[in-house]
Image (tube, helix red, strand yellow):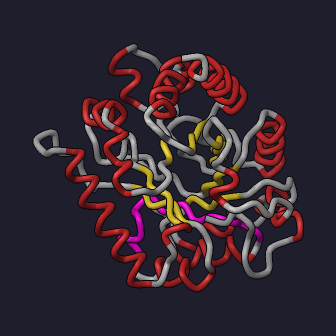
Amino acid sequence: MIVTSPGTAPAAASADHRTWPERLSRPYPLVMGVLNITPDSFSDGGRFVAPENALAQARRMVAEGADIIDIGAESTRPYGSQPISADEEIRRLQPILADVVSLGIPVSIDSMKSTVVAWALNHGAAIANDVWGLQHDPDMAKLIAERHCPVVIMHNRNNADPGIDIMADIAEFFLRSIGIATKAGISREHIALDPGIGFGKTQEQSMTVLARLAQFDTFGLPLLVGASRKRFIAAVSPSEPDQRLGGSIAAHLIAAKAGARIIRTHDVSETVQALRVATAIWDKQ
């Protein structure tokens, strides 16, 4: 899975030419910093809408050790998010994307719309992060194949169903998405899988997924986990999103121990430190 950017990417986006396996070879997972330039994201909606605030946050995450910046211009929170057009999504990205790319680490575009992903790839983004795993926009898989860019396939559901076997549901979803990717010509080395903590799942199901994450090793693909500030934490320890750092780190350490190779987080410095220390201790076992 190559993280240099295709097409017309600015030079800074291609500063790191290592392949995905090379980047994943270090002892602890890659850290993907979350940059929401939306007014309604569940945790930090509105804080980084202004381009200068978004760029300052991106710089902060790079300084804190982020390996990837994941930028999203449309809230995809499971409850209460308002869909926007592709034109509006691009309008929000235009003032900030090139500056974030210029910071020199790979940028992923968090979007379910192929037109938005295509625009972002043309302007320096290196990775597509699709919260519907190639199953929402029929043109997404073709675009990824043509651009030879990495894609994160995330599991999602329209509604949570406490009566289903969530592990089986995720596995079936991944099989469908991988089939779509294969048919379109996407290389397996360009695919990472995300079980979608908090998306179309009850809080109990999200915890079950984390507890049994290693079962997805059978796919032979890198796993990305984003449990940062999610609602299941408040189910165990009542708290607001910005008060869930401890729960986020606990979930991410469990994910790393189970084999996750990419951790998506709002809190980069604390997560980097936790992963490094935990890995150093695990190495003594």
Which residue occupies 49% across, 84% down?
142
Front residue of 242 and 8: 8
The overriding secondary structure of the stretch rendered in magenta is: loop
Q: In the image, 104: left or right of 111?
A: right
Please identify the quadrant where the N terminus is shown: bottom right
Q: Which residues are magenta?
A: 124-137
Q: Position of residue 101 (x, y in %)?
A: 80, 60
Q: Position of residue 219 (x, y in %)?
A: 37, 57
In the depicted structure, whether residue 93 falls above or below residue 52: below
Q: Position of residue 68 (x, y in %)?
A: 69, 50
Q: Position of residue 267 (x, y in %)?
A: 65, 30
Which residue occupies 29% across, 48% down?
200
Q: In the image, 141: left or right of 68?
A: left
Front residue of 92 and 202: 202
Instruction: Please say whether residue 225 is visible from this viewpoint.
Output: yes
In the depicted structure, whether residue 76 falls above or below residue 241: below
Q: Quadrant of residue 233?
A: top left
Q: Quadrant of residue 83?
A: bottom left
- 55 in the magenta segment: no
Q: How many marks?
A: 0
Q: In the image, 110: left or right of 3?
A: left
Q: Residue furthest front?
A: 285
Which residue occupies 36% across, 77% down?
180
Instruction: Please say whether residue 87 is visible from this viewpoint.
Output: no
Q: Residue furthest top?
A: 237
Which residue occupies 46% across, 57% down?
221
